[in-house]
């Protein structure tokens, strides 16, 4: 067979191998503890999260403004299951499963990272489905508000969870102070990770990205993935073609949430703290901006968007652009305004290039009508005049 | 066999009962959910004042309803402000089915503008009452115009180019504008809470009625809001532009054929919403006497909840929802703890979505616009 055609047929696989292979040797060019490595690890964790949100927003077309909830639940899973937070458990001896080194003697619950990831996937998937339940009957913009409300409820619980106690000793969360320290990742056949050498963190994050990427592609090309896209294009048409709405929507929420949970568990360990300040509404918008910048629904676009925005947030704004206002005689801290910059980016993208940097082909066709048919005016969609119930 | 024969006539009866229950829940479920909180509190107050509260009560510990009544009084005056903001949501949603996410932040800019103008108009604590009233009226007008123009500009830049785009596109630009305005707020007055001059001595008691102390702030909030609401109601139902707005919300295409300029009408709707938000901004600054850049985000979500609760698209609904949410918020602040209040309000939002997404007065959506 013509090698050209083989590459064409497996284009995504080839891109994936080249990208992941290229990324895998990247750490050898940088210091083990350099700021670049730090930014790169965070960027990879954000890629996992953005790919998760892409399933909900990009594939299934359900605008989720409360994605930070799953980050929070994933992070609290590792906070509870791999730290000294439950210091009193088992008579102060602690519970240890699959951990080695000095952690073995610490009080509290200490589970191996792989077990924690499994637990995080299960809890966030259930939480995703639960949050999805009340939105089933609602239209797009109402879904956005309900998910936002859930995100805020979770944040309030994260912030004030230290007031809720179980059995007098254990609290729900660490509040604003947070749960810290969190166990470092301890994989089989390797030493426990340290904060001095970031290479293993990078490769672990890259491994997570590879797994999530594989799952994303397989899901997109599956029956379920086609059902999601059908749902996005036209809910009523999809339902009459036999797509089970409830199941399909809930699976979208649960899968997207699970990815957020994986990333949350990883970040909990990497950042070494789980505190309520991490779970602001603005973070949901940050992840959404990644999906929109890259191109909703396009997996490569979303990856690009996540990498670009996390470097903009962690490197470009604080390190490169921040001195600029000082040079021209203005006195303000640009890092405080980073979310204003993202907001600006959202507006610009939506008005000028709503399909994103790397548009999905199908989505591009869908958005092609913008500005073309001015006669259509507002709300000509007859559906818009019915109430929120479909 | 016997079981089958007895079961057969029962099934339709049972189904009818379920059907009836479903209709009942649809009609009254939300009202029951709303009444549950005050009723539980009332029972708690009558039996033992601290029993149904997680927060200790500092006032006189009597077994009557005065604590609940003060909660409701505070709720009404807070709710008046939420109602003004909720009107902006409901007007815009009624006409272009868009949740104007940036609306709460327009309200915040209104507060900032109003407080910034205090100095310009020579307003300070202790001014003679005539000068104070005239100055505040001038500030009110300017703040309203600032917010109205800002809202129209946002519509022009962010929403109009996306009229025929999928629904989610303008919603995302709205979120973007919300962030932009918040950061304008940070640049303007910094990220911390700012104390606004307490021009009207809002905590000063005017009179006490049945154990409920009414303060000057309460009177101002209600007295300033009521005429604005009446004016708006009159405008939407009577004026030519109001009729155009209602026509556009019912059927933009038919309205266009009848000679209504749809674009102007939509801009005008945003102007009206912005005017109300500006007024709310000044009243909030006078009533709460602290302002900060994040107040708009919170207020926006609360007001949106109010608009949905009342039935989005309905003006009376927005006012009713505002007052109800204000009361819920005060009861929660006073008994559950202020830090939990956002969660309580959002839990109500989710409950409304589950039980009655069309809201309390939602049936009127298509008629009253």
Image (tube, rainbow, N blue to C red):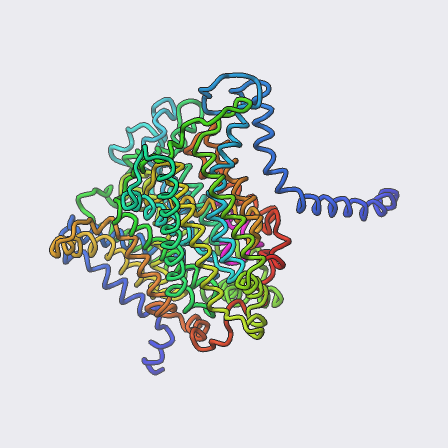
State yes or no: residue B197 in magenta: no
Q: Position of residue B149 (x, y in %)?
A: 38, 58
Give the magenta range: A127-143
Looking at the rendered structure, the number of numbered marks drawn on it comes to 0
When the figure is inspected, residue A130 is found, relative to residue A5, above or below; the finding is: above
When the figure is inspected, residue A370 is found, relative to residue A299, above or below; the finding is: below
At horizontal 36% and vertical 32% (from top left) the residue drawn is A109
- Principal SS element in the magenta part? helix
State yes or no: residue A138 in magenta: yes
Return the residue nearer the eye: B128 or B295. B128
Q: Position of residue B167 (x, y in %)?
A: 48, 63
Question: Can residue A214 be seen by looking at this rendering?
Answer: no
Question: If the image is split into quadrants, where does the N terminus of chain A sit?
Answer: bottom left
Classify residue A189 as left or right of residue A76: left
When the figure is inspected, residue A310 is found, relative to residue B9, above or below; the finding is: below
Q: Position of residue A190 (x, y in %)?
A: 25, 45
Residue farthest bottom in this picture: A2
Return the residue nearer the eye: B127 or A221. B127
Q: Position of residue B267 (x, y in %)?
A: 45, 63
When the figure is inspected, residue B254 is found, relative to residue B172, above or below; the finding is: below
At horizontal 39% and vertical 45% (from top left) the residue drawn is B137
Question: If the image is split into quadrants, where does the C terminus of chain A sit?
Answer: bottom right
Question: Can residue A47 be seen by looking at this rendering?
Answer: yes
Residue farthest left in this picture: A327
Q: For residue B45, what is the image quadrant?
A: top right
At horizontal 59% and vertical 48% (from top left) the residue drawn is B359
At horizontal 40% and vertical 52% (from top left) the residue drawn is B144
């Amino acid at each position: 067979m013509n090698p050209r055609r083989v590459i064409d047929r497996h284009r995504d696989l080839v891109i994936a191998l080249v990208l992941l292979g290229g990324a895998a040797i990247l750490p050898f060019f940088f210091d083990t503890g350099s700021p670049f490595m730090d930014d790169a690890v965070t960027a990879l964790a954000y890629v996992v999260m953005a790919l998760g949100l892409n399933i909900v927003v990009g594939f299934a077309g359900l605008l989720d403004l409360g994605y930070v909830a799953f980050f929070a639940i994933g992070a609290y899973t590792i906070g509870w299951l791999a730290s000294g937070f439950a210091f009193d458990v088992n008579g102060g001896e602690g519970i240890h499963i699959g951990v080695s080194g000095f952690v073995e003697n610490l009080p509290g619950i200490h589970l191996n990272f792989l077990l924690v990831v499994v637990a995080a996937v299960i809890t966030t998937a259930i939480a995703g489905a639960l949050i999805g339940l009340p939105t089933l009957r609602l239209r797009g913009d109402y879904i956005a508000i309900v998910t936002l409300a859930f995100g805020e409820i979770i944040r309030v619980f994260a912030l004030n969870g230290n007031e809720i106690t179980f059995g007098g000793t254990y609290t729900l969360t660490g509040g604003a102070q947070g749960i810290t320290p969190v166990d470092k990742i301890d994989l089989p056949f390797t030493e426990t990770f340290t904060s001095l050498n970031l290479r293993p963190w990078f490769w672990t994050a890259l491994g997570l990205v590879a797994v999530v990427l594989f799952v994303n592609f397989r899901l997109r090309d599956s029956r379920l993935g086609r059902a999601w896209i059908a749902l996005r294009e036209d809910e009523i048409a999809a339902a009459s073609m036999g797509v089970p709405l409830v199941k399909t929507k809930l699976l979208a929420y649960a899968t997207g949430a699970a990815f957020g949970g994986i990333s949350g568990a990883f970040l909990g360990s990497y950042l070494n703290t789980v505190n309520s300040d991490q779970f602001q509404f603005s973070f949901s918008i940050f992840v959404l901006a990644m999906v929109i910048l890259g191109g909703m629904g396009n997996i490569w676009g979303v990856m690009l968007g996540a990498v670009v925005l996390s470097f903009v947030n962690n490197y470009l704004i604080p390190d490169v652009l921040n001195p600029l206002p000082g040079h021209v005689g203005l006195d303000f801290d640009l890092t405080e305004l980073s979310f204003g910059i993202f907001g600006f980016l959202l507006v610009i993208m939506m008005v000028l290039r709503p399909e994103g940097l790397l548009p999905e082909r199908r989505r591009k066709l869908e958005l092609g009508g913008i500005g073309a048919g001015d006669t259509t005016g507002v709300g000509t969609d007859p559906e818009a005049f019915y109430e929120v119930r479909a | 066999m016997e079981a089958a024969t007895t079961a057969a006539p029962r099934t339709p009866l049972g189904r009818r009962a379920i059907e009836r229950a479903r209709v009942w829940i649809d009609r009254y479920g939300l009202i029951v959910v709303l009444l549950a909180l005050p009723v539980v509190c009332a029972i708690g107050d009558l039996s033992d004042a601290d029993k149904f509260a997680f927060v200790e009560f500092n006032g006189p510990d009597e077994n009557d309803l005065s604590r609940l009544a003060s909660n409701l009084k505070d709720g009404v005056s807070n709710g008046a402000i939420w109602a003004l903001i909720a009107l902006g949501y409901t007007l815009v949603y009624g006409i272009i089915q868009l949740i104007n996410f940036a609306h709460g932040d327009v309200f915040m800019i209104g507060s900032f503008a109003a407080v910034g103008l205090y100095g310009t108009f020579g307003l300070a604590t202790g001014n003679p009452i005539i000068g104070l009233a005239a100055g505040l009226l001038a500030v009110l007008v300017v703040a309203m115009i600032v917010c109205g123009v800002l809202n129209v500009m946002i519509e022009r830049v962010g929403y109009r180019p996306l009229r025929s785009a999928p629904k989610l596109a303008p919603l995302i630009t709205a979120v973007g504008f919300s962030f932009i305005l918040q950061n304008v707020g940070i640049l303007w007055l910094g990220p911390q809470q700012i104390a606004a001059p307490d021009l009207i001595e809002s905590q000063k008691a005017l009179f006490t009625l049945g154990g409920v102390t009414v303060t000057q702030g309460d009177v101002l909030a209600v007295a300033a809001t009521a005429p604005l609401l009446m004016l708006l109601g009159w405008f939407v139902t009577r004026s030519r532009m109001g009729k155009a707005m209602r026509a556009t919300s019912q059927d933009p295409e038919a309205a266009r054929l009848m000679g209504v300029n749809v674009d102007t009408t939509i801009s005008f709707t945003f102007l009206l919403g912005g005017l109300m938000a500006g007024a709310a901004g000044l009243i909030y600054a006078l009533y709460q006497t602290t302002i900060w850049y994040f107040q708009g985000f919170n207020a926006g979500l609360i007001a949106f909840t109010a608009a949905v609760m009342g039935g989005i698209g309905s003006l009376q609904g927005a006012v009713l929802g505002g007052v109800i949410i204000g009361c819920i918020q005060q009861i929660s602040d006073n008994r559950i703890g202020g830090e939990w209040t956002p969660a309580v309000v959002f839990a109500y939002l989710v409950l409304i979505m589950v039980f009655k997404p069309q809201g309390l007065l939602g049936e009127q959506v298509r008629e009253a616009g």
